[in-house]
């Protein structure tokens, strides 16, 4: 494994690690199987790319992507909490709608960003040498996101959000609306996923309407790998595990491709990885 290969895999793991943190909020904290993320990731890329083409500051486009992702999460929350549609179906309906919305936002299936100013070209212009420029920026972004998320989840609202997934009856008995907590969690989750989509789009140099296919599976794989490797004894450890899980997942994918595995087999590889890490605790217990 050469240095360039390792750095590229690490960069991808960090960029998609923010998406995995979003999936962690819905899947682990809220216990909500939210498929919206398959649509909110390309939504973030679409909004960011369209604004970049229009000449908007690349950092402003990230904020716009976060807002768009939050709105997508709010729609799923509304369908579930107000219209009483099942969580899985709520996410599917929003995800399906977002495909058409993303096409509307982009105006076409793909927007190239070659020659456009991005946050990566910004840090490159500051004189940070290649190949460390992209890596340094992504580390700064994901550390900032992790610290803010850790701090939020340890506030009173954060504790209420975490308890909503663990014991909703107890939260209701304390006079806290579980519907409001679900709405908040889904907005936060999809805002992070959309932010990841915007970063990935700027990193790859294009936004594509189909780039979100399989996002939920990759996110769950990252969460599960992190739990097995690092654990989840606290929020700080759990979020760190998600990020490390995302990096390990991307390294696994890159290694498989370098060994000659066809790109069409990556979904199968992801499923196998998830099965292996899900069954690892049971296997360890049986061996003992």
Image (cartoon, rainbow, N blue to C red):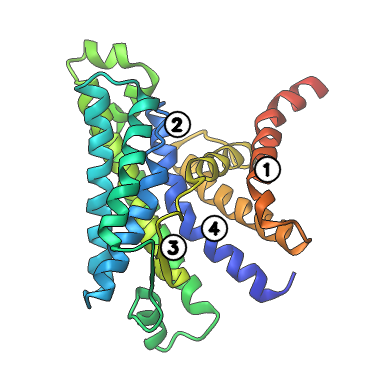
Mark with earlier residue (3, 4):
4
**Residue 13's disc number:** 4
Q: Categorize mark 4 by other alpha carbons within 10 Å: few (<14), some (14-19), many (20+).
A: many
Query: In the image, which is nearer the foreground, mark 3 or mark 4?
Result: 3
Camera-nearest residue between 249 and 260: 260
Asked if marks 1 and 3 touch (Cβ < 8 Å), the reply is no
Asked if residue 147 can be seen in this view, the reply is no
Camera-nearest residue between 67 and 35: 35
Helix or strand or loop: what does disc 1 sit on?
A: helix
**Residue 200's disc number:** 3
Mark with earlier residue (2, 1):
2
Point out the residue furthest to the front here.
Answer: 108
Mark 2 and mark 4: span between their CA atoms? Answer: 20 Å
**Residue 28's disc number:** 2
x, y (%) of residue 27? 44, 32
Helix or strand or loop: what does disc 2 sit on?
A: helix
Q: Taking 84 as reference, is 225 left or right? A: right
Residue shown at 47%/46% (left/top)? 20
| 12 shown above or below 78 | below
Please state, as top left, top right, bottom left or bottom right, where the C terminus lies in the image: top right
x, y (%) of residue 111? 37, 69
Mark with earlier residue (3, 2):
2
Helix or strand or loop: what does disc 4 sit on?
A: helix
Q: Taking 54 as reference, is 263 left or right? A: right
Point out the residue furthest to the right here.
Answer: 287
């Amino acid at each position: 494994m050469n240095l360039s290969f390792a750095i590229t895999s690490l960069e991808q793991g960090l960029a998609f690690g923010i998406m995995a943190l979003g999936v962690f909020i819905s899947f682990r904290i809220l216990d909500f199987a939210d498929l919206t993320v398959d649509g909110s990731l390309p939504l973030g890329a679409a909004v960011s790319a369209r604004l970049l083409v229009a000449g908007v500051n690349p950092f402003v486009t990230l904020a716009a992507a976060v807002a768009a992702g939050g709105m997508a999460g709010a729609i799923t929350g509304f369908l579930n909490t107000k219209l009483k549609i099942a969580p899985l179906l709520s996410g599917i309906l929003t995800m399906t709608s977002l495909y058409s919305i993303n096409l509307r936002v982009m105006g076409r299936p793909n927007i190239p960003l070659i020659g456009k100013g991005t946050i990566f070209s910004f840090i490159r212009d500051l004189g940070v040498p290649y190949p460390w420029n992209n890596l340094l920026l992504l580390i700064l972004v994901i550390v900032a996101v992790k610290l803010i998320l850790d701090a939020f989840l340890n506030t009173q609202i954060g504790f209420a959000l975490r308890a909503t997934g663990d014991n909703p009856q107890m939260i209701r008995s304390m006079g806290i609306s579980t519907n409001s907590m679900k709405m908040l969690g889904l907005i936060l989750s999809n805002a992070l996923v959309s932010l990841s989509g915007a970063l990935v789009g700027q990193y790859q140099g294009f936004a594509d309407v189909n780039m979100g296919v399989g996002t939920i599976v990759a996110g769950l794989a990252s969460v599960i790998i992190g739990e097995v490797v690092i654990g989840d004894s606290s929020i700080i450890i759990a979020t760190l595990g998600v990020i490390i899980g995302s990096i390990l997942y991307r390294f696994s994918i890159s290694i498989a491709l370098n060994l000659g595995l066809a790109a069409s087999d990556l979904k199968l590889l992801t499923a196998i990885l998830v099965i292996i890490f899900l069954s690892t605790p049971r296997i360890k217990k049986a061996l003992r």
